[in-house]
Amino acid sequence: MSRESSARWPGTEPPRSGASSPSDADVIPLLTKEQTVSASAMRETSAVDPAGGGAVVRFIRRRPLVSFFLWAYTVGQVLPWSVTAAGLADRAWLMSGSVVVSTFVGLLLPALVITRIADGPEALRGLWRRAVKMRVGVAWYAAAFLLVPAVTLAVGVLVGGGPPDRSVRFLLSTLGPHFLLPLLVTFVLINWWEEVTWMGFVQARLQDWRGPLLAAVLVAPLFALQHSSLAAGQGLVPGAVLLLLLAVLAVPFRIALGWAYNRTGSLFLVGLIHAAGNATTGGDGVNAGYLRHLYPGNSNVTMAHLLAMVLLGLLVLIVTRGRLLGADTPKPPERSRRAAATAHATKDES
C-alpha cells in the first residue's frame, strides 16, 4: 500500500491503485467476475460541502465513523446496560426488547443520519437499495438456509455429542418453532438492520480505507463490544473472557460476511446469513434456537454458529487468498474522488 493511500481517512473514497493480481474467478463458481462489487462504487456517495453546517455537522463530515461510535457506545447502550445493571438480564423478553431498541436507535439511526450528512442523499438511497436487494444467485440463498445451518449443526454435534432425542419425527417437528420462527424474528428485528449498519456503513468504509481483510479484522472487536451488556450479565470475569473470545471469533465471521457482501452487494443476504447462524443455535432470545432445543441445559452448543463461521471464514480466506475482492473491482466514480479530495483539503486546513 502506498504512503498516499495509507494516509486516507475512513469514510472517504480514495482512488483505486489499479494494481492487478491473479483472479479468483476460476477457483469456485461463486467467485465470478460479474459478482465482484466494489464497496466504493456501491456507496454511490454524493459530493457534499464539508465546510457547511454547524460545528457538529462539520465534525460528522470529517469523522463519520468516530461520530457513529460516540453515539453507538453511549446512547445506543443505555437501555441494554440498564437492564443488565438492574439484574434483569435473565428476563428474556425484557433483554431482547432492549436489544431490539438498541439496534434501531443505537445502530441504524446514527448510520442513516451520518450517511445523509457526510455523503449526501444519493448515498443514503444507495445504502437503502443495498439493504433491500434480494436478487442474488440461488447459491447464495442456499448458503444462508442450508450451508450455514448444516455446518453449525455439525459443530454442535461435535461439541455436544448426540442429542438426547434423535428420532426423525422430533428433529423435523422442531424445525418450524425452533429454526424458522427464530430466523424470521431475529432477521426482521435485529440482524438485518445490524448488518446494514456494521457491514453497509462501518465495514464498507473501513475496507475503502484499508482493504477488505484488514477492515474485517478492525470491525471484529468493535462488533464484539456492541454485545458488552450481554456479556456483563455473566459476571465481571466470565463476561470479560466471553467478550475477548467473541472478539477473536468475530474476525473470521466478519471475513465471511464481508466476502458475501462484496460479491453480491446485498445487505439483505448478509443479514440473512447472520440470522441463520443465530437461529440454529441460541434463537431470538425468547424462542430457543434449534441446537438449544436439541440440547436443553447445554450452553456450550450456543457458540456453535461462531465456530462454524470460523471454519467458513477461514475457507473464504484460503480460497480468495486473503483478497476478498476481485482483481477487476471498478474504481470509485469521479464525483466520489472529488468529494474525498475536498474532505482531505478541509481536514488539512482545520
Image (cartoon, rainbow, N blue to C red):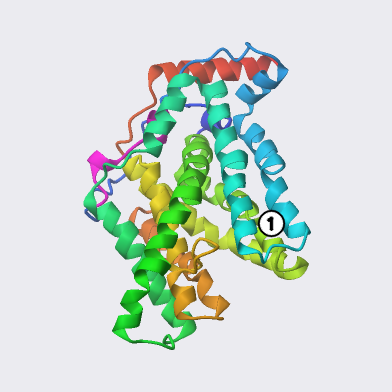
Part of the protein shown in magenta: 30-43
Whether residue 161 is situated above or below residue 345 in the rendered picture: below
Image coordinates of residue 310 in percent, x first then y, are: 46, 64
Q: Residue drawn at (64%, 28%), measured in percent from left and top?
A: 63
* Residue 158 inside the magenta-drawn segment: no
Magenta stretch contains residue 35: yes
Left or right of 45, for residue 86: right
| Point 61% across, 65% down: residue | 245
- Position of the C terminus, as image quadrant, is top right
Identify which residue is drawn at 48% across, 83% down. 160
Determine the image quadrant of residue 177.
Answer: bottom left
In this rendered view, identify the residue nearer to me: 170 or 328.
Answer: 170
Residue nearer the viewer, 89 or 276: 89
From the viewer's perspective, tell me whether residue 281 is left or right of residue 49.
Answer: left
Residue 185 on image: x %, y % = 45, 55
Is residue 313 among the parts visible in the rendering? no
- Name the amino acid type tagged 1: Ser
Between 168 and 30, the residue placed more toward the observer is: 168
Q: Residue 235: tell me if it is visible.
A: yes
List the residue tagged with mark 1.
Answer: 229
Expressed as whole percent of the image width and height from the top left, the position of residue 92 reads 61, 63
Rate crowding at label 1 as few (under 14), some (14 to 19) or many (20 or more) other CA atoms within 10 Å: many
Q: Secondary structure at mark 1?
A: helix
Q: Position of residue 53 (x, y in %)?
A: 65, 13
Could you say which quadrant of the image residue 297 lies in? bottom right
Q: In the figure, is residue 173 to the left or right of 128?
A: left
Label tally: 1
Q: Residue at x 39, y 55 (%)?
A: 273
Classify residue 154 by image quadrant: bottom left
| Above or below 26: residue 131 | above
